[in-house]
Amino acid sequence: MKISIGTSASLLVLAMTLANGRALAGDDLQWLESPHDAKALAWAREATEKTRQRLGALPSKAAISRELASVLAQAPAEPDQFLLGERKVRFFRDASHPYGQLQTAPRDAKGTATGWKTVLDVAGLREREGIPFELQVYTFGSSCLAPEYARCLLRLSPGGGDEVEIREFDIAKGEFVAGGFKVGKSRAFAEWMGPDKLLVAHTLGQAAKTIAGWPATVGLWTRGQPLDAVKPAYSGESSDAILQVSTVGTGAATQGVVTRAIDYSTFEVALIDAAGNARLLPFPRALKSFGVQGASSRHIIVQLAQDAVIEGKAYKAETVMAYDTGADAQDGQRLSAVYAPAEGEFVGAAFGGFAATRDDVFMLVDQNLRQRVVAARFADGQWKHRQVLQAAPGETITLRGDERDHNEFVASIAGFVTPRSQYLVREDGGRSLLAQDPVVMDGSGFVTEIGSAVSKDGTSIDYFLLKPRKPASGPQPVLMTGYGAFGLSFRPGYFDAVMGGPALKLWLERGGSVAIPAIRGGGERGSAWHMAAIREKRQNSYDDFIAVTEHLVRTGFTSPDRIGIFGMSNGGLLTATLGTQRPDLFGAVVSDVPLTDLIRMRHMGMGAAWMDEYGNPDDPVQAAAMLAYSPYQNVRKGTRYPPFLVTISTEDNRVGPGHARKLAYRLEQAGAPTYFYEDEEGGHGVSDAFRNPELMALRMSFLVTNLMARP
């Protein structure tokens, strides 16, 4: 066979393609990929026990365990409070109730609640049914039926994975509804279309599935009808990533909304009426992450990822758009621009960046990492705006609209050392404090700064830095985290899960600092910031993080032996990549529930849905880019690596435990100081201080010993 290659770039592609073939053919660790394979589980259990013993013997471990137990015994952070009709709802967790309690209380006009009552104790449910259920709580605004909000659809996950049972629960009586709606264990979604009708999608039996194993069809399910008799009202393709459902409107005017993620950059939105008729909406397919951003009593809200011409009119990328579903709206006039960001402004966030009420759309507007809230209301043929809130630098706002029959919403404000406050914001702009987190530690000795560094290609990268006002002399111990994919961004939070929860207190009290680089792949500067680090451009994300790290070293703030990196999910990929690319730059690496083998990603968890983000290994150019950074393939014998702690759950069926297992095994083969911990419950959120205080104590001992202890 004669091959003609015309450029050095083509030679590189050919070489990497051949390397790709070798990686697939010569991967001797594929046996670790199957979550419940006996041999793989035996290895994971042995490695976990070894880690328990090794980290448990560290000099700092006993003190850290005692301190963490003391922190967890204090009053916990206030859970999200949902205002639903005449009651409030919350999912309460503390050290005594690590699996949580669903609670309700009556509310007054200001949102004040007294006398919380537990209506479901998840630990008790686990004991009664003999199944390790965990309650997945995203929002009760749509899972409870308006306007009484007494009947709710609860998502119960056996083991904490993405497969759930959906059951109808009477929150007023505190019991499951006898003969009520129930979807068996599967990947499933359900939304109320009326008292006796659901919009439902599931993967039970022979139901059609997407490439990532999520439901590929959506139908209307009438009470009393067998679930397997539900006919599809809308169908995606088997090659899709995921279909998600929501609703728009209230009462008899409620309609179903299906967001079809063809991939995580390309979306189709369909409307389903009460009779089960579906129609596509005239949005372009290039929408920002996760497609539909919310819905008011009549408007469906999306945001453009690219410039677009819709119905003959041009709109700029980042414009927030609305589609009017009202029966009185005129065809051809249903589409409108809600908000067009000014130069330097970026609107929204993937989670908590929008809230919609009866008449208003609330949006986070970000400029240079500083946030404010803008409200928009459609009146007299146009959207009119008003500013509602502004956060101090270093604070983070999240938004939530629980009800579509009122114009009040909930805003939460928090910072690294600013306890989260939840406010009910009324239509007149007044606000009432719903709840405030108890003080975990005195934050007056710390200051939050926003700085910037220059990446390898000249791009300016902003970052958050929390540091002591009066630091000890010498290089500072710093923990760094980030995400940088799917348009998702990490921002300061008050001892929240992103920052390691209450365990972070132990780091700060010992004089530690924290940094979050706003790297490309995230959404800090809009869709273009996300797209600048997908597929063959992903190295930009890692170069950005490295640039901030080197800046902190170059300015004398810290030194490589004092820098620890931690991250979860794509953040776990981030830290694993940084630790293998630049082992000289970091003193410790925590890779939690990570992706690590980009070539085999599509064969584990729901990785097949993410090829638009990371690349397709069958494409030579993309495969070359993936192999250049994929951590599992880039572990090299003879390299001096910093200590790695790799953590996962057997029941994590989102990324799959194979990634973590294979990386840890390969690192150990290469002689790297490696620690591996696999919990057999917990799913993708395994690193939770209430659920798993042992793991978080071991993690903090690992970091303190490697970054703070001096020879």
Image (cartoon, grey):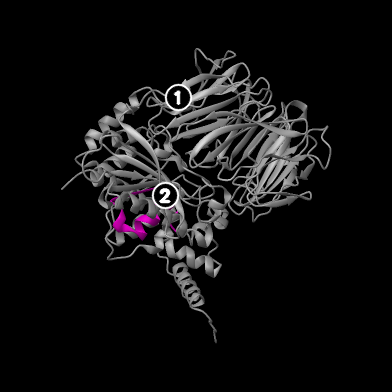
Within 10 Å of disc 2 (Cα), the crowding (few <14, some 14-19, many 20+) is many
Give the extent of the magenta segment: 572-597
Label 2 secondary element: helix
Residues 493 and 506: in front is 493
Above or below — where is 316 with respect to 434? below
Label 1 secondary element: loop
> What is the C-alpha distance between the residues marked 1 and 2?
27 Å
Outermost residue, left side: 711
Q: Are marks 1 and 2 in contact (CB under 8 Å)?
A: no
> In the shown orientation, is residue 383 left or right of residue 450?
right
Residue 640 shows up from this direction: yes
Residue 78 - label: 1
Above or below — where is 426 with respect to 603? above
Residue highlighted by disc 2: 572
**Dot 2 amino acid type:** Gly
Residues 508 and 45: in front is 508
The picture places residue 401, in percent across and down from the top left corner, at: 61, 28
Within 10 Å of disc 1 (Cα), the crowding (few <14, some 14-19, many 20+) is many
Number of marks:
2
**Dot 1 amino acid type:** Glu
Outermost residue, front side: 343
